Image: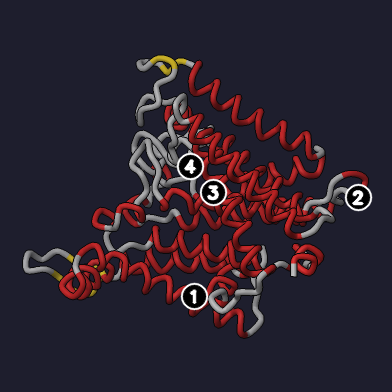
Amino acid sequence: MASKMISRKLNPSRSSALDVFRGLTLAGMILVNNEGNWDLAYYQLRHTVWHGFTLADLVFPSFVFIMGVAVAFTARGGAAGPSRRDWAHILKRVGILFALGLLLNFNPSRLSFAHYRIPGVLQRIALSYLFCTILVTYAGKKGQVAAAVGLLATYWALMKLVPVPGFGAGDLSMQGNLVAFIDNHLIPGHLFESAWDPEGLLSTLPAIATGLIGVMAGHRLRENIPEAEKISGLLVGGCILVAAGLFAKHWFPINKNLWSPSFVLLTGGIAMNGLAMCIWFVDFKRVTFWTKPFVVLGVNSITAYVFSEFLMGLTMVTPVGHTAAGETIMLRNFVFDRLLTPLVGPCNGALVYALVCLAATIAVAGLLYKRKIFIKI
């Protein structure tokens, strides 16, 4: 039995586990983003307000991580690097992702361009994808590791040593940190909050490092070694990163909004361990009875994400009635306040609402999958 286990091979470029992991990550993102009421959602399904960590904070970096894994398989380095046509496709993909992100930022209450939000989830993924592709193309594995370490060290130094007017150096509060200062001077009025943005310009640097951790995991999966060694290598690497993140938090708190170095290490390690477990169960042990919903999400991940965000926006602007005071009742509030909360309570109602949105997204993705429609950017 042991010899068969070690000798079994799989082609990671066609690994179902990668789609399953991507789908699991997207499902988590949909649950977090589509709560019936974010203030009443269960604690672990709400993003930490500032310093700290919840499960909700894991989904975005996991998405950036699995993007890095994909780059390790698709980007070409060395003499057989990308042609001009390849680079045209890469830049086109970056542009489409960025444009989709801007489209999803549409807010009827902020129609003026002076107040239109520019940063966002897909924008950060687009930039991380671009720089990870450049590094995989023109730098070897050691260079990529050095780049990840250098990005984290540079970001750490900038955040700790560069003084912010009125606050000084090393201030990591919402208003006093360097990320918020730069955003407010370069793109004032275009932020998620009045003083800061969770996908700020400077904090994209450590996000690229998250993508590079995924690239390292992808390189491990491409090695011509037994699968047991690949999986154990990912688990060991993941545990080292988690330990490093928990150690580093004493000098730079775990913070999703700042994408702190400790946050990068912790979430990168958890994502690496999660991918290893997916590969073990799905590709190695063939325990796949539970994977279909996540596969259909994973193979059309960007399409599914855009649909889920569109669905959320639609329910928030669709009027279905008026209160006794004459205020408009939107569909999202009606379903949560009038239907779900009386039936299952506020916390469960918020979760059920998110589960309904997830089920709707899986249904749409499943229809595309059944018809063999895979929308690639």
Mark 4 vs mark 1, CA separation in Å = 27 Å
Q: Residue furthest bottom?
A: 371
Mark 1 vs mark 2, CA separation in Å = 38 Å
Q: Amino acid at mark 4?
A: Glu
Q: Amino acid at mark 2?
A: Ala
Q: Earlier in the sequence, mark 2 or mark 3?
A: 2
Residue located at (39% from left, 36% from top): 196
Check disc 2 and report its element: helix, strand or loop: helix
Residue located at (59% from left, 67% from top): 20
Q: Earlier in the sequence, mark 3 or mark 1?
A: 3
Q: Earlier in the sequence, mark 4 or mark 3?
A: 4
Image position of 356 (left or right of 151): left
Q: Closer to the camera: disc 2 or disc 3?
A: 3
Q: Closer to the camera: disc 3 or disc 1?
A: 3
Q: Earlier in the sequence, mark 4 or mark 2?
A: 2
Mark 4 vs mark 3, CA separation in Å = 21 Å
Local packing at callout 2 (Cα closer than 10 Å; few below 14, some 14-19, many 20+) is few
Q: Earlier in the sequence, mark 1 or mark 2?
A: 2
Local packing at callout 4 (Cα closer than 10 Å; few below 14, some 14-19, many 20+) is many
Mark 4 vs mark 2, CA separation in Å = 34 Å
Q: Closer to the camera: disc 4 or disc 3?
A: 3
Q: Which residue is mark 1?
A: 362
Q: Which residue is mark 3?
A: 270
Decide: is 164 above or below 219. above
Asked whether 331 or 258 is in front, the reply is: 258
Q: Quadrant of the N terminus?
A: bottom right
Q: Which residue is mark 2?
A: 80
Q: Earlier in the sequence, mark 4 or mark 1?
A: 4
Q: Residue furthest left?
A: 324
Check disc 4 and report its element: helix, strand or loop: loop
